[in-house]
Image (cartoon, rainbow, N blue to C red):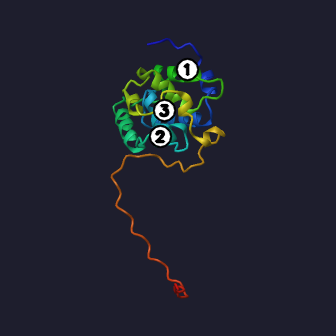
Amino acid sequence: MRALTKDIKWLVTRLGPAATKALELAVRRAMSATHVEVTTEHLLRALLDLPDSDLSVSMEAARIGRVDVAARLDAALGRLKGRHDGKPKFSEALCLLLEDASKLTTEPVRTGHLVAALLADPTLSPAGCAGLFAALPRQPLYLLTSKLEDRGEVGRAPAAPVAPAAPAAPAASPPAERSAEPAPKAR
């Protein structure tokens, strides 16, 4: 594997608002699972929880199901070692992903840059999760699709976590309200 050449703190400061939020979510997920490291899979799973990110918008355009990808990432994360007390460290692959994404732009790093870096080097996902995004375009320009992320906004869309679940039964529609006046007759 390549050697990390940048300071991780510098790489984190390069992240845009959505990418920063995703990294924070990834660290929280790793800590709650008592994992030793924050991995690329933690970050990818966190990106799915941001419905207004470049990744989510690109996946929707490519008709890639967020729930299916979340289930695969959850399975990969479930195989990681747990029982770690303390803060997890960033894995080497995650640091390299952040470094590669930062090389794609002079602007703040967006979630589309993170995905483009992963697609350019699938080995940065030790669990092989890069293949889940095979239908996405390879060029960063075509992955920068979120209008909210363009404006530096994050969290505007409801950030309900994507959880794999059984298909829900259709909800019963509420009874139609009756109007006090009869409808006019058509002539």
Q: Mark 2 and mark 3: span between their CA atoms?
A: 9 Å
Amino acid type at circle 3 is Leu
Observer-nearest residue: 50 or 29? Answer: 50
Q: Residue 139, how many percent across, how many down?
A: 52, 27
Provide the secondary structure element on which disc 3 rests: helix
Residue 84, located in which quarter of the rendered image? top left
Which of marks 3 and 1 precedes in the sequence? 3
Q: Mark 3 highlights which residue?
A: 43
Which of marks 2 and 1 precedes in the sequence? 2
Q: Residue at x 51, y 21 (%)?
A: 95
Q: Characterize the local packing of mark 3: few (<14), some (14-19) or many (20 or more) Cα atoms within 10 angstroms.
A: many
Q: Characterize the local packing of mark 1: few (<14), some (14-19) or many (20 or more) Cα atoms within 10 angstroms.
A: many
Residue 82, located in which quarter of the rendered image? top left
Q: Mark 1 and mark 2: span between their CA atoms?
A: 21 Å
Evaluate if marks 1 and 2 touch, with contact meaning CB atoms under 8 Å apart: no
Q: Mark 1 highlights which residue?
A: 99
Observer-nearest residue: 60 or 173? Answer: 60
Q: Residue at x 56, y 38 (%)?
A: 145
